[in-house]
Amino acid sequence: MTPPAATDELPVAVIGAGPVGLAAAAHLRDRGLPFVVLEAGPAVGASVRGWGHVRTFTPWQYLVDPTAERLLAATGWQRPTTPVPPTGAELVEHYLEPLAHAVGGVRLGARVTAVTRDGYDKARTVGRAERPLVLRVTERGTGGGERTTELRARAVVDASGTWTRPNPLGASGLPVPGEREAAAHMVGALPDVAAQRERFAGRRTLVVGAGHSAANTLLALAELAGSAPGTELVWAIRGSDPSRVYGGGDADELAARGALGTRLRALVESGGLRLVTGFAATEVEPDGDGTVAVVGTAHGRPERLGGLHAIAVATGFRPDLDVLSEVRLDLDPGLEAPRRLAPLVDPAFHSCGTVPPHGHRDLEQPEPGLYVVGMKSYGRAPTFLVTTGNEQVRSVVAALAGDLAAADDVQLVLPESGVCSTDAQGRDAGAGGCCGAPGAVEVPAEAHRPRPDGVPAQGFATGVAGGGAVGALTLVAARSGTDGGCGTGGCCTS
């Protein structure tokens, strides 16, 4: 859906200066379209910096957008050739910062608080498409206070991600009673344990969640416990079996990810932590001596996890939709992803299936010129591929440039994942069915796009025997989620 010609002279507004937002800027620069990138943080890659101490599993060649690389090459920049995946901090230093400098047009500390249509509220239709979009932007003023301005744009590409909206502790999707009051004990999904040693050393920490974020935090705490006596680890998961978090160990084509699972399994089997399975929190309450307790059930029986100095909730993320409340959206009611994209990424199917190539037609909204891309486009689905985000914005920008042939020619061929992949008819082709369960999983027609004969399956690597290299494309920032079922932070997620 290309915006009307009357607004062509206005810039495209990109929300977020992370990997996908800056890739969008690179494509806009390459196409000669005016643009501005609005980053709420004080520096580019603000969300990535939030997990800057964590090493991704993603090789450089899959992180760097090809058009961005071409623009950077003109400045003398070269993509790092090391086979070692970068940390979040290295990704910012060696890619995002140079890219922001090369593309220009980035406004830091510019928080978008609302998007609307110029002179039109959401209910007004006649003539709507001829009016520009308006972004309300809050920035720090010269006197130290805040000032709010409005920016008119021909299109808006929302690449703001989900990092700033973590899921709560409560399994129902709401904070449990006492959770907000215990904010001082909450340390986020991926705390920098080494940098905050005094907060964790000699204390008891509860980690909730069964994704790679939880695994990273548990291993960091275990390393600290080796040199700080009295450091205790409690790991609570909503599922009944932690083995899905371990992956394939030596069989994993990504050595770093396989090692993570192997180390976590060894930690559990050594008794280095207390594991509580089938856990659902119902309340957080004070427990004396400055600690708190998380009260709930484990397999339906009362369970109280007390004496906690810190709680790391690694149960996934969700999109911030408040900023888009005055524009017309068509989102899946469950995942909060664009309706046409949602079945293609729904973890109910695609943790054990495929994520087909998709582009501007799957991402556009009823509001002309509005696109939700990147991690935010997946809504609450836990697995996002950064290469997928790069291809999303390539397609979107081509559409904005009026090159629909290029926009529709979405190229995203990912290797076969082995177990938990689907065949050309959308049936689970993994050994033993979904994540080893008996039988086959039938993927609904709307959640599957057939592949041409001879094209390998496209899906998630699980790290088990037969798993493909697609997991190399997964950014560690998306490695959180609950473990309530296949694909929700459990099996088949990367």
Image (cartoon, rainbow, N blue to C red):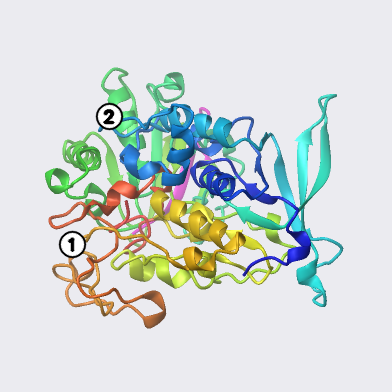
Q: Residue at x 50, y 62 (%)?
A: 172
| Relative horizontal placement of residue 449, taking residue 30 as reference (left or right) | left
- Indicate the position of residue 180 as horizontal and vertical percent values: 60, 44
Residue drawn at x 58%, y 46% as measured from the top left: 178
Q: Is residue 82 magenta?
A: no
Any part of residue 420 in sight = yes
Quarter of image, res 128? bottom right
Quadrant housing the N terminus: bottom right
Residue interval drawn in magenta? 286-298
Name which residue type carries label 2. Answer: Thr
Query: How far across and how far down the image is residue 286, in percent?
Result: 54, 38
Q: Amino acid at mark 1?
A: Gly
Dot in front, 2 or 1: 2
* Above or below for 181 versus 365: above
Categorize mark 1 by other alpha carbons within 10 Å: few (<14), some (14-19), many (20+). Answer: many
Residue 221 appears in which quarter of the rendering? top left
Gap between marks 2 and 1 measured at Cα = 27 Å
- Specify the label residue 418 is tagged with: 1
Up/down of 473 relative to 437, above or below: above
Q: Secondary structure at mark 2?
A: loop
Question: In x, y percent, where is residue 188?
Answer: 49, 38
Residue underneath mark 2 = 82
Predominant SS along the magenta part? strand
List x then y, in percent, for residue 75: 49, 28
Q: Nearer the viewer, residue 444 or 79?
A: 79
Sequence-first disc among 2 and 1: 2
